[in-house]
Image (tube, rainbow, N blue to C red):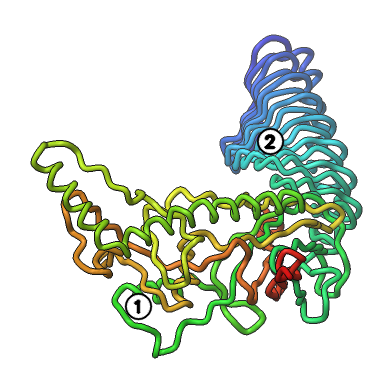
């Protein structure tokens, strides 16, 4: 029998319609099954052989490609009903050899297969942007491989059962680097805290006003072992001991409001007291001396101006002359020129003197400490320096019991000395300051924080704290110039 014909099988499940040769299905034909499944394509000597198309009604899957003795064999494309698509090699109805599969979630694998499973070298591009390239064993990442994460982090090392396992290196997107042993997806050594090195018992040191000091830390585990990671970003900040004044502190609306603000701004420490934020810098000793000299010069220059102001305030005739000048200016229409300066530097005043808020604006702050990154689990700062408090430093104002101007209530210097509201006189709000070009003696706390962003393992290290007790600087001995002449 040759040509085109239709054949119904005795079991009535199969039905063939297509070409025949010498009584066998040969050429192009279609084998239809009672459940709706079918094959359409090439036949040779009664067998499904060559290129064809297969549809399974039970799953909805379709295959187009090569067949051998009725089986999927060779190159072909399988479209799964859940949306997954495989393109590549087949061997006896199984994905085997080289191919690619895009699953229903959007993940794409390209590499080698064995018995339907990813096996051998391959690359998986995940829907979240991560990319793995390396070895696979029975659908699991196993052997050596590299993961490039969507956040730019990179892991390069060993895998086992789809997890980081063995020797590997993680280059975190924050700049942090961990190199070492991994166990079941976790580092074998995981730092949990920052520890100070070389300090006295209790993490306490004593320095004199104006001295610099060094600080060294290590990143350690809970067991105290140093973890030699790289690139963990650390920040040094400082605070001064803040103990709110007692009830007998001079009261006033502004001082009470400021006290409440300060209590909210303070933070606890492991030394049993709270601190308020305080500036800290790092610089060479020569720069520290230059800064102190500049502060002393500024103080001296401003003190001359202040003395002139005080003399004018104490001279009633000078005040009358000012009034006369004011009157003349008013009559003649000319502008009145004040002899009093517009602003006063605070550091030349006494503890209970006051300075305008305008004078406090624009005062330069010492340069902040640049964050440091760890090397082999350690970091060091060689020249830490506690500078004098900036003008109008609020914690000291509160501690000194000074009246701080608020938004609702303020007192000017002129009003505190009497009625100075003459023509051309400008009233200014005042703040109390403490004199000096050195840090005030007392207790200061230096904190080292892990500010790696994003945090490694989603958890920053526990910070380390150093208590710095600042002692008053001794006055230099009096020289020959201080002795009485005979």
Q: Quadrant of the N terminus?
A: top right
Residue for badge 2 = 108
Residue 318 higher or lower than 54, as above or below:
below
Q: Quadrant of residue 484?
A: bottom right
Residue at 80%, 56% (x, y): give it.
382
User: What is the spatial separation of the Cα atoms under label 2 and label 1, in whole angstroms?
Assistant: 65 Å
Question: Which of labels 2 and 1 is toward the front?
Answer: 1
Residue at 82%, 64% (x, y): give it.
218
| Horizontal side, residue 485 vs residue 118: left or right | left
The residue lying toward the viewer, choosing from 170 and 372, is 372
Q: Residue 287: in sight, yes or no?
A: yes
Q: Quadrant of residue 299?
A: bottom right
Q: Quadrant of the C terminus?
A: bottom right
Q: Quadrant of residue 430?
A: bottom left
Residue at 65%, 12% (x, y): give it.
4
Where's residue 174, x and y in %?
Answer: 69, 47
The residue lying toward the viewer, choosing from 124 and 94, is 124
Residue at 65%, 52% (x, y): give it.
293
Residue for badge 1 = 256
Where's residue 311, x and y in %?
Answer: 37, 60
Residue furthest toward the left? 331
Q: Earlier in the sequence, mark 2 or mark 1?
A: 2
Where's residue 24, x and y in %?
Answer: 77, 19
| Horizontal side, residue 129 vs residue 324: left or right | right
Where's residue 364, x and y in %?
Answer: 53, 49
Which element is circle 2 on? strand
How many numbered badges does the structure rendering display?
Answer: 2
**Residue 241 disc label:** none
Q: Mark 1: few, some, or many residues within 10 Å (few <14, many ≥20)? A: some
The residue lying toward the viewer, choosing from 35 and 465, is 465
């Amino acid at each position: 029998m040759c040509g085109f014909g239709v054949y119904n099988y005795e079991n009535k499940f199969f039905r063939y319609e297509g070409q025949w040769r010498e009584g066998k299905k040969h050429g192009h034909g279609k084998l239809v099954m009672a459940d709706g499944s079918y094959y359409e394509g090439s036949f040779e000597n009664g067998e499904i052989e060559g290129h064809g198309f297969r549809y399974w009604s039970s799953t909805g899957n379709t295959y187009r490609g090569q067949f051998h003795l009725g089986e999927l064999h060779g190159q072909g494309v399988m479209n799964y009903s859940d949306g997954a698509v495989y393109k590549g090699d087949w061997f006896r109805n199984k994905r085997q050899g080289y191919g690619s599969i895009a699953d229903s979630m959007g993940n794409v694998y390209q590499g080698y297969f064995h018995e339907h499973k990813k096996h051998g070298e391959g690359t998986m591009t995940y829907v979240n942007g991560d990319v793995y390239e390396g070895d696979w064993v029975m659908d699991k990442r196993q052997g050596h491989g590299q993961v490039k994460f969507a956040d730019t982090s990179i892991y390069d090392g060993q895998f086992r059962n789809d997890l980081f396992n063995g020797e590997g290196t993680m280059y975190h997107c924050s700049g942090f680097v961990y190199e070492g042993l991994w166990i079941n997806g976790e580092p074998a050594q995981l730092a949990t805290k920052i520890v100070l090195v070389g300090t006295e018992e209790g993490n306490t040191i004593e320095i004199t006003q104006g001295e610099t000091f060094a600080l060294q830390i290590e990143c350690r585990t809970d067991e105290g072992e140093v973890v030699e990671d790289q690139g963990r970003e650390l920040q040094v900040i400082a605070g001064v001991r803040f103990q709110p004044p007692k009830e007998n502190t001079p009261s006033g609306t502004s001082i009470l409001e400021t006290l409440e603000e300060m209590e909210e701004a303070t933070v606890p420490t492991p030394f049993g007291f709270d601190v308020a934020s305080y500036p800290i810098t790092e610089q060479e000793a020569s720069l520290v001396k230059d800064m102190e000299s500049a502060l002393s010069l500024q103080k001296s220059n401003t003190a001359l101006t202040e003395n002139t102001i005080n003399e004018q305030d104490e001279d009633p005739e000078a005040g009358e002359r000012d009034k006369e000048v004011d009157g003349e200016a008013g009559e003649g229409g000319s502008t009145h020129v004040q002899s009093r300066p517009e602003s006063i530097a605070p550091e030349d005043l006494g503890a209970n003197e006051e300075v305008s808020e305008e004078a406090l604006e624009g005062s330069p702050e010492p340069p902040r400490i640049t964050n440091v990154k760890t090397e082999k689990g350690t970091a060091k700062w060689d020249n830490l320096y506690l500078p004098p408090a900036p003008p109008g430093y609020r914690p000291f104002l509160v501690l000194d019991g000074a009246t701080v101007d608020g938004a609702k209530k303020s007192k000017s210097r002129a009003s505190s000395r009497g009625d100075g509201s003459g023509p051309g006189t400008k009233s200014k709000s005042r703040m109390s300051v403490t004199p000096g070009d050195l840090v005030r003696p007392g207790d200061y706390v230096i904190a080292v924080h892990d500010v790696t962003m994003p945090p490694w393992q989603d958890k920053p290290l526990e910070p380390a704290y150093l208590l710095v007790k600042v002692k008053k600087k001794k006055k230099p001995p009096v020289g020959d110039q201080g002795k009485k002449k005979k």
